[in-house]
Amino acid sequence: MKSLHENSSSVIKYKPHISEPFSISQGVRQGGILSTDLCKLYVNLLLDRLVDTGRDGRIGTVLVNSFA
């Protein structure tokens, strides 16, 4: 898992300009083979935490527990 994100770098392209390469130290690689599963894992943990709080959210009279 660690080797999939080791030594990752990127550049920013804007119109005809390209930035100098910079290292990526956190996040999930876009289009990576594990990206979808890692995102789902994070969202599920976040939703579990939300449920554990016992709180809910409301917009007017509409109950909004989560958007996932």
Image (cartoon, helix red, strand yellow):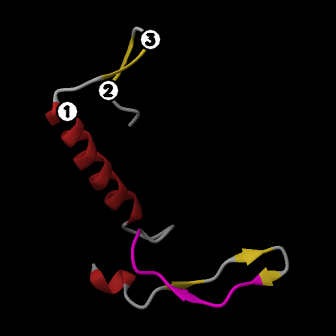
Kind of residue at badge 2: Asn
Within 10 Å of disc 2 (Cα), the crowding (few <14, some 14-19, many 20+) is few
* In this view, the mark in front (3 or 1): 3
Q: Which residues are magenta?
A: 18-27
Residue extending furthest toward the right = 16
Residue at horizontal 23%, vertical 48%?
45
Viewer-closest of 24 and 36: 24
Q: Are marks 2 and 3 in contact (CB under 8 Å)?
A: no
Q: Position of residue 29 (x, y in %)?
A: 46, 71
Q: Position of residue 6 (x, y in %)?
A: 37, 88
Label 3, secondary structure: give it. loop
Q: Say whether residue 15 is left or right of residue 47.
A: right
Identify the residue under disc 1. 51
Give residue 65's mark. 2
**Distance between the Cα atoms at labels 1 and 2?**
8 Å
**Distance between the Cα atoms at labels 2 and 3?**
13 Å
Examine the residues drawn in magenta and state their main secondary structure.
loop
Answer above or below: position of 62 versus 28: above
Which quarter of the figure is the N terminus placed in? bottom left
Q: Are marks 1 and 2 in contact (CB under 8 Å)?
A: yes
Label 2, secondary structure: give it. loop
Residue at horizontal 32%, vertical 61%?
38
Q: Are marks 3 and 1 in contact (CB under 8 Å)?
A: no
Q: Quadrant of the rendered structure where residue 39 is?
A: bottom left
Kind of residue at badge 1: Val
Q: Is residue 10 magenta?
A: no
Earlier residue among tags 1 and 2: 1
Earlier residue among tags 3 and 1: 1
Identify the residue under disc 3. 60
Earlier residue among tags 2 and 3: 3
